Image (spheres, rainbow, N blue to C red):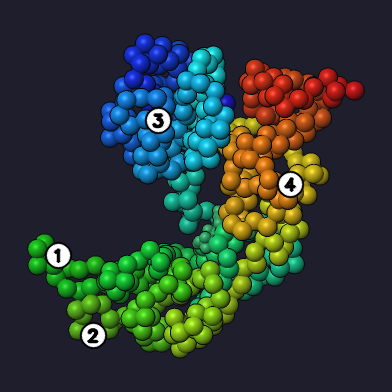
Amino acid sequence: MSFFTAEQTIFFVDDDASLRTANAQTLDLAGLPVEAFPDAAAVLPRIAADFPGIVVTDIRMPGMDGLELRAAIHAVDPDIPVILITGHADVAMAVRALHDGAFDFLTKPFASDHLVGAARRALAHRALILDNRRLTAAAAAIDSPLIGESAAMDRLRETIAQLAQADIDVLIEGETGTGKELVAHMLHRRSRRSPASLIAVNCAALPHELAEAELFGSDLIDRATGKLGQAGRIRSAHRGTLFLDEIDTMHAAVQAKLLRVIEEREVQPIGAAAPEPVDLRIVAASKIDLMEAVRAGAFREDLYYRLNVVKLRLPPLRERRSDIPQTFAFFLDEAAAKIGVEGFRIDDGVRRHLVEHDWPGNVRELRNFAYSVVMNLPSDVGLAGVATELTLAERVQRFEATIIRDTLAQTRGNIADTMRHLGLPRKTLYDKMQRLGIDPKGFRA
Ligand SMILES: Nc1ncnc2c1ncn2[C@@H]1O[C@H](COP(=O)(O)OP(=O)(O)OP(=O)(O)O)[C@@H](O)[C@H]1O
Ligand SMILES: [Mg+2]
């Protein structure tokens, strides 16, 4: 597993100079780039959202301690793995810290291969996250498939195929993580508008004072710079698709102006003498039933009827449970392929738990869970039913045990093959089997 890149660095923080030097040397000898820091104040200015590495920090330090440092780092970027080092085995604190977002935990004294193993896993995880971010940024160019073979998904695919060509406005409704953004991109890419852009606007993230200029543009000359105002998203979407996400949160004043764009297919930028024609297709999305917002007086009825030429309702996972195993398997394979391990298999027990879980975060949650399983990370997702009374650590252990047993059954107890399948070093595998009470001999029948 050598897929972390050269620019990835470990920031090692410890106020104890001799431990700092020794541990930095250990990481360096293992071929991992490392920089050492004496305290939180020294390392924090170096942390940014695109920092390509990880942080390993002692907990007990003068000034800001390791737990506070973890929180400060995650205020900048919650996806930077932070490994904490503690002087004594405090399981309760470890579980709490993991729950709060720490990546891993080492108790002093630790063997050097523990430190190296934990750092490698964290670096691999970070590489995956940065890779994912790049992929997301390029998502418009990628035709990701809509997974699911249930009748509901078949119908949805058919409707998308027909609608894409039809060039009419579409309203997409569905809970969080059901694929609204994915479907909006599919509609655009399969339409005659695909050579132009899909311009996405998240109405919830747009403060209403800025919304008008952002959307409709401004032809006012900036007195300070002498430059002409902004084009606005609507004009930028000319010949393409305007994706209005979270449309239910749009401010009333903006709703009124948008109505005119839809009815007349023209836009009047701030300060412009006359409206200009625009050629666009509008795809709007809402997490809530937009008719409810109309009834509550929060959304204009006339605008609702203009947007709702066709409504696509994306079903939550719990309404198409038969799709869960296939969808989970797809994301497991995707995650496994990224880190170069062979595909995981899930047994009937795990399958049942997955299918019974309600997945309030829908496909996004299922996807994140699949990645956390492959990366051997703690996850907030419990396995339904059995999981509710278990601590996070116990849930992770259960899942780990299932995966290890499953793999041992597949390899008939062959340790080398099991290591390869799971991407675990020999010692880690033995440690885990011992902790989980798994005897590989039992699989050699
Ligand atoms: N049917 C599906 N098949 C494959 N991947 C899917 C499916 N539905 C959603 N996804 C994936 O799940 C993740 C979440 O989807 P998306 O961002 O489109 O959800 P959303 O409905 O826009 O959620 P939110 O309301 O929270 O913005 C994405 O990674 C997306 O590619
Ligand atoms: Mg979305």
The CA span between labels 1 and 3 is: 48 Å
Q: Quadrant of the rendered structure where residue 111 is?
A: top right
Nearest the camera: 272 or 120? 120
Q: Residue at x 68, y 48 (%)?
A: 388
Q: Is mark 1 within 8 Å of ligand 2?
A: no
Which marked residue is nearer to the observer: mark 1 or mark 4?
Answer: 4
The CA span between labels 1 and 4 is: 62 Å
Quarter of the image where the C terminus is located: top right
- Tell me if residue 207 comes above or below residue 272 in the rendering: above
The CA span between labels 3 and 4 is: 33 Å
Mark 3 or 2, nearer chain start = 3
Mark 4 or 2, nearer chain start = 2
- Could you say whether the residue bearing mark 3 is in a helix, strand or loop? helix
Q: Position of residue 398 (x, y in %)?
A: 71, 36
Which marked residue is nearer to the observer: mark 3 or mark 2?
Answer: 3
Q: Amino acid at mark 3?
A: Gly
Quarter of the image where the N terminus is located: top right
Q: Which residue is mark 4?
A: 386
Q: Amino acid at mark 1?
A: Lys
Q: Which residue is mark 3?
A: 66
Mark 1 or 4, nearer chain start = 1
- Tell me if residue 135 comes above or below residue 429 in the rendering: below
Q: Which residue is mark 2?
A: 274
Left or right: 256 in relation to 367: left
Q: Which residue is mark 1?
A: 227
Q: Amino acid at mark 4?
A: Val
Q: Amino acid at mark 2?
A: Ala
Q: Which mark is residue 195?
A: none
